[in-house]
Amino acid sequence: MTNPILTDADIDTSAIRGKPVAIIGYGNQGRAQALNLRDSGVDVTVGLRSGSASEAAARTDGFEPLPMTEAAARADIVILLVPDEVQPELWNETLSGAARKGATIGFAHGLAIHYGLIEPRADLDVILVAPKGPGKALRADYERGSGLISLVAVAQDASGTARATALAYAGALGCGRAGILETSFQQETEADLFNEQGVLWGVIPELIEAGFDTLVDAGFAPEIAYFECLTEVKLLADLIYERGIAGMRGAISNTAEFGAAEGSGRIVTAEARAEMKRILAEVQDGSFVRRLMADARAGYPALRASRARAAAHPVEAVAARMRALKSKR
């Protein structure tokens, strides 16, 4: 069944009007959401840890950050925009006792709720508002008078008005200008975690590196390999975004389209599709999240090793040279 796409016309703005909002964290999403809410007339407070590196940025933007517990205590709506792996300890040990009775707590990703890492008090509404893009895009689109599509969901509706609050919050971010889709914490969380591993952030960079290595190993200049395997990804993404996959095919040359047909199924094989299903199974059974939390508790050794491997790949040196050339123009 296809979910209807909701817009500003479907939103009751009174569900958020006059309600103080606390944004906990001032990173990628925190900054964008706080600024968009303020520009939409919402009473916004930023809550930060003492000595947070984000404090100067928040002050520059005109906010007076408060300690997290104080910000949560004065708010009707508390939005956790700190990293997923930080949320459970922060909420369970600090913010849960500070939140007002009958308040709403909200998330931009459902991981902590879906996997039971946070068990909210029974008197609280629990909502999800997940703009489908990074904070910079959320802010830039808002300033242009448009918005990002957002997902919304309700995990706990103590007040009977949690859905209205979620929609009004999404509207204040500017998402009602583009479209709002209702979903569940389970679907948003599991689909997003699968995508991160099995499609976008895991597989596409690895394909780029593998293609680069193949050309360089065959004697092609690194710069040629860089342009062919990396820079054209933006062209592909833009075309797919604007026209869809079939429309993208119609916008490229016959040679490129024939090459795409010839290469189809040779990389994304039945074995690769089976591996995608295994990735999804690990997301759904919680084993991926258990590994994530274990790595966080140990100080991120696996994540730091992955970052080091990525930084050491030869394509990064070529990319740095190309960016330096571009900056001189």
Image (cartoon, rainbow, N blue to C red):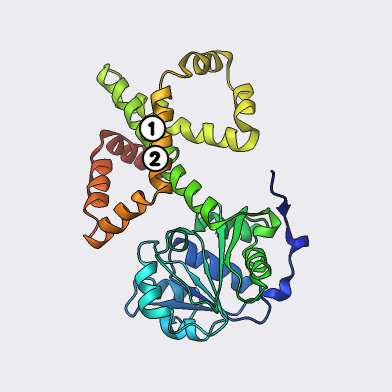
Image quadrant occupied by the C terminus: top left
The crowd level at tag 2 (other Cα within 10 Å; few <14, some 14-19, many 20+) is: some
Q: Is residue 274 left or right of residue 187?
A: left
Tell which of 5 and 42 is nearer to you. 5
At label 2, the amino acid type is Ile
Where in the figure is residue 48, as x and y percent of width and height? 40, 76
Q: Which residue is labeled 1 in the image?
A: 275
Image point 74% across, 69% down: which residue? Answer: 12
Question: Do labels 2 and 1 touch, CB within 8 Å?
Answer: yes
At label 1, the amino acid type is Glu
Image point 43% across, 45% down: which residue? Answer: 196
Q: Is residue 82 left or right of residue 150?
A: left
The numbered mark at residue 327 is none
Q: Secondary structure at mark 1?
A: helix
Where in the figure is residue 30, as x and y percent of width and height? 48, 67
Q: Name above or below for residue 272 compared with residue 3.
A: above
Q: Name above or below for residue 269 compared with residue 202.
A: above
Where in the figure is residue 214, as x and y percent of width and height? 30, 21
The numbered mark at residue 279 is 2
Image quadrant occupied by the N terminus: top right
Disc 2 to disc 1, C-alpha distance: 6 Å
- Any part of residue 218 in sight: yes
- Any part of residue 329 in sight: no
Q: Is residue 249 left or right of residue 296?
A: right
Image point 28% across, 59% down: which residue? Answer: 296
Number of dots carrying numbers: 2
Q: Secondary structure at mark 2?
A: helix
